[in-house]
Amino acid sequence: MSGRGRLALCAYAATLMAAGALLPLVDSPGWLVQAAFLLAVQSGVGVLARRLPLPSALTVAAQALAGLVLLTLVFAGDRALLGVVPGPDTLVRFGELMSIGGQDIERYAIPAPASEGIRLMLVGGVLVIGLMVDTIAVTFRSAAPAGLPLLALYSVAAGLAGGAASALWFVLAASGYLLLLLAESRDRLSQWGRVFSGTPSAPPRGERAFGSGGTPGAPVRTGRRIGVLALGVALVVPLALPALDGGLLSDFDGGDGSGSGSGTINAVNPMVSLQNSLNQPAEREWLRYRTNAADTSGMYLRLVALDRFDGSRWLTSERDVEDLPDQLPRPEGLSSSVRTQEVETRITAAGSFAQEWLPMPFPAAGVDVEGRWRFEPEGRSLVGDRGQNTRDLEYTIRSLLVQPTAQQLATAPAPPADIATEYTRLPPALPSVVEETARQVTAGAESDYEAAVRLQEWFTTTGGFTYDTDVNSGSGPGAIARFLRDKEGFCVHFSASMAAMARTLGIPARVAVGFTPGTARGDGSMSVSNRNAHAWPELYFEGVGWTRFEPTPSIGSAPDYSLPDSPSAEESAAPSEPKETASQAPAPTVSASDSCPADARQRGECAGSAAAGEGTVTGSGGPPSWRPFLLVPALVAVLLLPLLPMLWRIRVTARRLGSRGRTDEDAAERALLAWQEVTDTAWDHGIPPDESLTARRSAVRIVLLGKLEGAAAESVHRTAGAVEQVLYAPEPRPVPGLVDDVARVRAGLSAGAGRWGRIRARLFPRSSVRVVWALAARRQAFAGRLGDRADSWRARLPGLRRPFRGRG
């Protein structure tokens, strides 16, 4: 196999190894097999085109056309001529599939089903990246910049996969890149090897990488050492650095989120990115339920409780799980003296809503559900085991509607010691302003219940807080302090801050994650969408148990028992009439308004928006996602940015050498442009121009410094002679063959520059600095014209002349 053939094979392998990082995004790996076959055909077209040989531009065009034909055959054969020839209808079909793929990305959780739109985006993306890698590494023989598209492919995959990305995919992608470097740059690697192995400089040109007896030569040994060192640094160094997570007020964070058969459940991330989902432009239905509860305003569907606070994040603790019993145990701390009512709720999850925690009203008393679900008693949550999730799930929940009175909460005894110890634990790094603010807000409170009500009222009404989903309060222990200072945020900020402040007062607290009740539909069911995803604090009161509060302004509804003027026991015992909750309002932004009464605002009856949800979205309708259409141009722009000097140089060369020279004036201009191309080519190869020298002396200098001989040296002198004819001869004579002379000079300079010198001259030409000079000259000329125009206006209008200011 030829050198370019091996390089093409390595480029193909490197692309597929980097594409492996996309596997966690889709539930079926079949798309990668399809992409591997299509990419092999596209790469094969490049190998054949280079053997003919075709010019580089035609080689790239042939590969791009082959990729388009392959995608047409697989995804739009019914819209193409003879099933393979793309036309306008084919492009329309691709646009439709891209739109569907964008909606599917918005709709499905990871791993998403391999729908046709998603497969087109994945396979097409791999073909595009493969074409870039092949073009840069094989056609232009420069493997180092080929790492940019490989890095872009891996980075996009790792960013979307989040916790599903593992070190394996990084190792595969990095190994593919190192393989590409080894195949392309043997001499360059041997020169680097002097740092690591002390071996001499690169072997003579033509020497094989393997010495006698099959022993690896210096380039291969050096490549291995560099590869091991690079991978070691990339994998080991991050372990020694501080965590770079989003922190308390950006995302909820946790572990892998999968139940195991070992009887324990680790920390889980139920909200992949709550803030991003709060800003989703489209509303998607996730759940639909029917219930026999008379009032659905308190029908919060709870996923999980985050009970561990490390100063930066609220996390779920590692807990023991057990088999799901037919009858769930009575809620911890709930006394028989507190009024309860059992309600039944039938919930249906959308086919695209894949959540490993089961949404349920709290506290659940019994669950009728199919599948592998485990029960975590401490948080009274159900978690899927071995990949079990809520997709297309229908289940029935029997739950307790707990109706305590304000008197029962106010007179609650002290919590048990184990609960008080665990759920009031705070990190030492928590800023003191958190406790100081909590004590100021609750000053004079006669019970933990009254303190909790005052905290809720301060957040929702009297504290001057504003609901804003675009706020970024940063991360780390100071995030709560910044939120309390700026008083802008969304449900994560309010729930996490109230729970932390309650703990500073000795009240057991945690943060619950789930959904507000949703919107009533005409058929009597309730619809829960991404805009209903929410977080709220739960505080513990002995005799009542874990009790919900609602500190987020105008989101959800505050329970009757948590309002300052709470009804009596008799009033609270009677179910209230159903009412529309603020979570049903569609507007995305809410702020406090003086025109809204305080009690109405606490009940969520003011105009505003509902919180949006996390992570994945589902349902149909709404505009297609625009982000994939912006991501591709942005990615292309980032990849093309380092290539701008090379592209500018190619354009300038084509313009200079494109003159036909049909007239004497054209011939003179052609000679001057050819000479400028010679001097710039020499500059690109390390011989800067000297404007003080004549054309003849410059030619001698280029020949000496460039070590040109034979035809290349004669071409330099012939081009310089043509310039002298134009500048000094009374009747300049046209000099034929200047374009060929320029090509011979370039070839001679490239031969003497070495491989790295050729790469440097091709990708990063020094003469491209002329662009900067031209822009500076234009700016100066523009400033001069403005100055002249200003002087002209001052001359016409004497009143604009500057007055003389004497000294003294």
Image: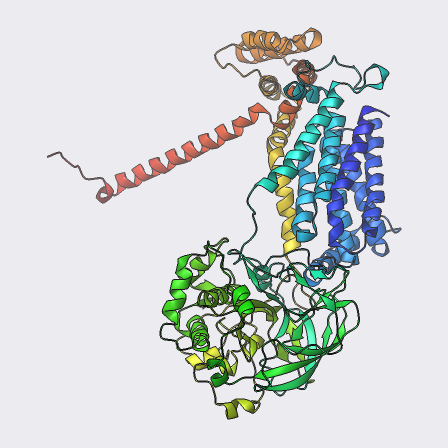
Q: Identify the image quadrant of the N terminus.
A: top right
From the viewer's perspective, tell me whether residue 304 is left or right of residue 172: left
Colour basis = rainbow
Q: Nearer the viewer, residue 322 or 198?
A: 322
Q: Nearer the viewer, residue 107 or 793?
A: 107
Residue depicted at x 49% and y 15%: 691
Q: Position of residue 490 (x, y in %)?
A: 51, 65
Q: Residue drawn 46% across and 81% down?
A: 410
**Residue at (84, 14) in percent of width and height:** 212
Q: Residue furthest front?
A: 417
Q: Nearer the viewer, residue 712 or 751?
A: 751
Q: Is residue 263 left or right of residue 466?
A: right
634 and 669: which is toward the camera: 634
Rendered position, 87 above or below 655: below
Using the rendered view, name the quadrant where residue 346 is placed.
Answer: bottom right
Residue 605 image offset from top left, x and y in percent: 50, 80
Vertical order, 151 against 142 (above or below): below
Give x and y (percent) for residue 225. 70, 26
Regarding residue 390, the answer to whether it shows in the image is no
**Where is the C terminus found, in terms of image quarters?**
top left
